[in-house]
Image (cartoon, grey):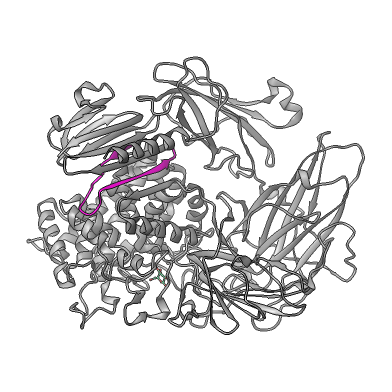
Amino acid sequence: MTSALVFLIVCLLALTGCAGSGASRADAGATLAPTNLRCEYLVNPTAIDTATPRLSWELRPLTPGTRGLSQAAYEIEVFTEIPEKASDPQKAVLWTTGKVASGETCQIEYAGAKFAPGFGAKWQVRVWDQAGRVSAWSPPASWTRGLTSKEWEGVRWIGDPTPAPAGFGELPAPMLRKQFAIPASGRQVVRATAYVSALGLYELRLNGQRVGDHVLAPEWTDYTKRVQFQTYDVTAMIRTGENCIGAILGDGWFAGKVGLAGIVPKGPPRAIYGRQPRLFMQLEVRFADGTSESIVSDDSWRSTIDGPIRTSDIMDGETYDARREMPGWDSPGFDAAAWSPVRVCEAPTATVVAQPNEPVRVNRTIKPIAITEPKPGVYVFDLGQNMVGWCRVQLAGKPGETITLHHAEVLNPDGTIYYTNLRGAHQTDRYTFRTDAAETFEPRFTYHGFRYVEVTGLSTKPALDSIVGCVVNSSSPEVGTFECSEPMLNRLWQNILWTQRGNLVGVPTDCPQRDERCGWMGDILAFAPTACYNMDMAGFLTKWVPDTRDAQALDGRFADFSPHPYQPDVRFSGVAAWGDAGVFVPWAAYQFYGDTRMLAEQFDAAKAWIEFIHSKNPDLLWKHSRGNDYGDWLNADTLKLGGGAGWPAKGAEVPKHVFATIFFFRSTQIVSEMASVLGHTDEAKKYAELAEAIRAAFVKAYVQADGKMEGDTQAGYALALHFGLIPESLQSAAVDRMVDRFKPYDGQISTGFHSTLPLMTQLSARGRNDEAYRLLLNRKMPSWGYEVDHGATTIWERWDGWVEGRGYQDPGMNSFAHYAIGAVGEWMYGTMLGIQPTSPGFATVDIHPRPGPGVKWARGSYHSIRGPIVSGWERTDESMMIVVSIPPNVVARIFLPTKDVAKASIDGKPLAECKDVIVQGVQDGSVVCRVGSGDFVFFVAR
Ligand code: BGC
């Protein structure tokens, strides 16, 4: 115990002590430092569309672990960055709040002077603690306003003039360039900013160098409605004299394969939004004398398709012929006489908006752990981790020789790669050598889901270090940690995180490898809270929640996936637990970030969804109009365990009308709660009454007097209990039935995408926590342990992705990186560690860890919008230790696992002797204490 204790405390202090960047020197006596200043969730964002962005900060205790710190007041100052104003203190101040008596640290709306798009502000904050001690001013942070449609006037959409081939044939990637001069007229450049968008993807180049580190930009939106632009500070890249700006364009989601392209009956195989990519950009150069010049995409640019990228496609891969490289094409002085004038295209219907989310980037690289040669000349690299992105290759061949890189998640028994489950996504890159020296290749306009890379076309065996895996995902900050005494669970947690990384590429996708990669709504509905514990999803969801509105059908149906590249009123819309993501996901964001603006923007869409369901089901049971009606997807009825293995062939799946009505109820209830938050009292009442009526109809129709539900499934009880549809008097009977339903399944789980987390949560919350641990630690299929034991490094789509003796199941539907069943991550944070918000944005939290058999200790943390929250525990036969850290300004209830307060101690003393802990009583079999910020180590004798 002693060494583990020391270890836990060291970890805890390390976590809390280094939570932020250093502020300027504190005033004497100060206790707090405002840190991690953000605007609209981003650190120093360079393009914010709204004139009234929201500011936030965290509070770092100057002495780590200090107890009972809170913010009593704050003061914000905002200054203009416009040079001539900045030098005049009178004119420079845009906003000063004075001392505001408030504990708020986030979602504080800027209410200062408006300033022009393209210009920025610097801001700082200081705070007073509970004893009136003022902090130092924080180091300054900044934001810059994005451009409105007015600033885009005169900018044209340009592309290569070569007509697209008939049918759906592909064209090489266009390269576009323009040379321009910044005369040495004595005007000094103070800032140069590139604002760039495209239909398709772009890589921007300036004076021979790549601009920025975004990849796969702009990310996928409904290009008929909204397309994002990115902003880059290129001041250091601009020269006096001749300059050259260039762009390479890829087909991307706009013109390549997208969504279910190719498998949708009668759908086009690719190019759903358009045939050819186009660039839209402006480079604004500002001079010290206050003047500025813009270089924009227009008819003065030139283009060629004779460059090295011969084809590129998100799903299929990239074909690169290095012999066609044109050194210097993106620098001044290159002879582009053979290039053609660009084609100026019609402007799309889409609005061009600033990117509100962290960009997709190469966020890490990994090295292969092995290389094999299962057939002569066929080399298979093993990255050791199922990942998403591409390979950076350094290899040598002969001029004109081509190597092929084929990417796959798993292997065949003979060691070759297994790609049947990729369906129509080829995931193949090809590279043709230019010289006989070693050359480096990294594709630009594709991404792959893979652990293994098969390389062919080489005449000698490559070295292990000749490829590197570039891991590509939206760079939403990772904010969760988890570790426990059971290695399998640590791997499971890693697998969940890796699966999330791979499925956040601007859109929360179902999978990153086969020919889908869609923002499937049901998957993110199930996974959103886990996603928020793992990563700061606020910026990401600020981008994606509008995608759900863009995809909504006119009659109120949310789509099955968003963006939705098909006619929304015709197909893939209106499914229970998929469409409901349009309600559930912004509500989850509200729980995690306290974001009421996102709720306000989504409110009408959410109401329209409820109204649609209600209009088709006036008797309040969702029996009609359920679209493709996926139900509790991939539950045990779809496993190959039926019959022979002692399992019933059917009967695990909660009946679809029961399932749908549960979601109808919960969405209606959330809409009522949204209305309350937004102050729409009448609507709050209206939807609360509707929800009550749905609940009553549900109970009447589907729940018997003895608590037995229609279908009598694990999943049905779990969902109905989880969302509060079972009357109190029947809840314990329903729990008994739920547990009884393990019997036909040999004691195992039989739930699907939507009921697995509810099952775990309800077991733990309703006195069957040991059962939850038993399921969690199970190693027999279906279980998480089975996947881990069989080499999974990401979460499988199906419990039976690979079956001993039978191999890979159902190649049409067998991804090895699907996060839905990884929603158990929410249970790991929220139940096992017990970190739960009790008010939006974690202003108040419960720390209610629930240890269980098979796990001796667990620890982890969640870095909330208000700072890091830590929970850890360790059990021995004699006692249990609970370690907690709470950031300043957050109030927590700690649940100690005893009913007897005399058995609990802190700092080696009875609880009553600690002034920082207020014992509130016994609840749910636990002594409950209230604490403010600080580090706490409790012991409970067993
Ligand atoms: C996807 C799922 C999705 C489903 C709808 C599948 O093809 O991969 O994850 O939610 O379709 O049932």
Relative to 822, residue 934 above or below? above
Magenta residue check for 509: no
Relative to 551, residue 909 above or below? above
Q: Nearer the viewer, residue 552 or 136?
A: 136
Q: Nearer the viewer, residue 585 or 44?
A: 44
Total tally of numbered discs in the picture? 0
Farthest residue to the left: give it. Answer: 706
The spot of residue 279 in percent (x, y) is 72, 61
Q: From the viewer's perspective, is 11 left or right of 284?
A: left
Q: Quadrant of ligand 1?
A: bottom left
The spot of residue 834 in percent (x, y) is 29, 44
Q: From the viewer's perspective, is 808 left or right of 282?
A: left
The spot of residue 432 in percent (x, y) is 72, 76
Name which quarter of the figure residue 941 lies in.
Answer: top left
Q: Residue at x 87, y 37 (%)?
A: 187
Q: Is residue 795 visible?
A: yes
What quarter of the picture does the C terminus occupy? top left
What stretch of residues is rendered in magenta?
844-867
What quarter of the picture does the N terminus occupy? top left
Relative to 235, residue 516 above or below? below
Q: From the viewer's perspective, is 443 left or right of 618?
A: right
Q: Nearer the viewer, residue 217 or 682?
A: 217
Q: Residue at x 17, y 51 (%)?
A: 766
Farthest residue to the right: give it. Answer: 185
Q: Is residue 608 visible?
A: no
Q: Residue at x 47, y 72 (%)?
A: 409
The spot of residue 440 in percent (x, y) is 70, 66
Q: Residue at x 23, y 31 (%)?
A: 929
Q: Nearer the viewer, residue 761 or 617?
A: 761
Magenta residue check for 848: yes
Name which quarter of the figure residue 225 lies in.
Answer: bottom right
